[in-house]
Amino acid sequence: MFDPHKIREDFPILKRKINNHPLVYLDNAATSQKPRQVIEAIKNFYENRNANVHRAVHTLSQEASELYEKAHEEVADFINADGIEEIVFVRGTTEAINLVAYSWGLRNLKKGDEVIVSLMEHHSNIVPWEILSKINGFSIKYVGLNDEGGLDYEAYEELITKKTKIACFSHVSNFSGIINDVKRIAKIAHDHGALTLIDGAQSVPHLPTDVRDLDVDFLAFSGHKMLGPTGIGVLYGKRDILENMEPFQGGGEMIREVLFDSITQRCTITWNNLPWKFEAGTPNICDGVGLMEAVKYLRAIGMENVQAHEHVLTEYAMKRMLECRNVEIYGPKDASLKCGIIPFNVEGFSSHDVALFLDNYGIMIRSGFHCTQPLHTIFKLKSSARVSFYIYNTREEVDKFMEALMEIEQI
Ligand code: 7TS
């Protein structure tokens, strides 16, 4: 039985008081809190297993290498990838998208080509493409939103052409929480001979994810938003595509051989096997192990249960927020269309004022642009406040949030 009260016992930070109130953490879209199991795994690694990987023959290095590879396996199983060759550990979603932009995009996109990006994207799925287009001269076409605040699929179908080489969309918006139809996005892209890059930063932590069923070519996500440590994230890529890509960065770990030819005075270099070809230098071994523990924790709960729990909280919170006269919610009002994220504003208050007021009661929410400035322009917003839920949030916490929100309204 899924019981958030029981789950909370695993999260030491939730025992904290802030401003003499029990911590109510509702900023999960920014980063999640960490369970004891993940914290222990990190401590245990440094206390008992620490060594560099894939380098030495000694026992400690063998153990560390085995653990680090197991972490890739655990992640591969979690998203139903076809083996660890398809799982590249990176720093996070941002680095995963940059890896695709520079390793794949730099060599495959040229003047006359097109890249499709949605206006719903986090800046990390816009800025790398804008930077690269200035180098390679390809054009970017932006897909807008429909009346419900979802992706305008019709506009996407109209914009895509045979010149489109890659379509870049988020699975779940970090502003509205709306869930995009990734299968449909991928089918449209593939029908036109284009690849898809899906930003899974807000979906992988909250929904069951099956990359083979979704048929995406690349999927980027961050460990820290799914109970794992910061500094570790994942780029999933279809094996044949990754095989045909050049490395992102050069150095140790990613090479098989570096042969110096005394006649040409140059080195001939061959790349290591996947996924190591894309993991140059000493990787973030310990946080990879931490991520493995986070994935195990989520799998034990069951991603269907995670999604169902967030749905209940989101539906309840939205219902209560919609009853407030001076609170406006953005995006879809039907909780079944979204993950546990609710963007809103209180009339007459800036989003930062709302967040600071709630902070007095120990309630942590995000305010600002949430790195989605183009989306805020579409919604004609200077900024917004945002609550976002995860497995340890409770109905009582929603009530506390509502109590404080109603106090702001009375002011
Ligand atoms: N993509 C989406 C959809 C995100 O929500 C975020 C982070 C990122 C990419 C970047 O992830 P990173 O781990 O590489 O930084 N989103 C947020 C947020 O909504 N509030 O703070 C960070």
Image (cartoon, rainbow, N blue to C red):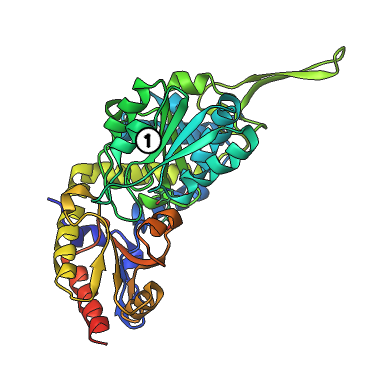
Secondary element type, mark 1: helix
Picture layout, residue 267 above or below residue 353: above
Q: Residues within 10 Å of mark 1 (few under 14, many from 20)?
A: many
Picture layout, residue 261 above or below residue 213: above
Picture layout, residue 267 above or below residue 365: above
Of residue 134 and residue 271, the one placed in the foreground of this image is 134
- Residue 63 shown left or right of residue 257 in the figure: left
For residue 374, what is the image quadrant?
A: bottom left
- Residue 148 shown left or right of residue 122 in the figure: left
> What is the x, y in percent for residue 7?
23, 57
Of residue 150 and residue 232, the one placed in the foreground of this image is 150
> What is the x, y in percent for residue 37?
35, 52
- Quadrant of the rendering where the C terminus is positioned: bottom left
Of residue 151 and residue 5, the one placed in the foreground of this image is 151
Cβ of mark 1 under 8 Å from ligand 1: the answer is no
Instruction: Name the outermost residue toward the front.
Output: 158
Identify the residue at horizontal 49%, vertical 23% (top origin).
Answer: 242
Kindly identify the amino acid type of the residue bearing the numbered disc 1: Val
> What is the x, y in percent for residue 69?
46, 31
For residue 254, what is the image quadrant?
A: top right
Of residue 404 and residue 42, the one placed in the foreground of this image is 404
Q: Is residue 199 visible?
A: no
Q: How many marks?
A: 1
Identify the residue at horizontal 37%, vertical 27% (top origin).
Answer: 189
Label 1, on which residue? 75
Identify the residue at horizontal 62%, vertical 32% (top origin).
Answer: 136
> What is the x, y in percent for residue 352?
40, 74
Q: Is residue 5 visible?
A: yes
- Residue 209 shown left or right of residue 258 in the figure: left
Instruction: Name the outermost residue toward the bottom.
Output: 411
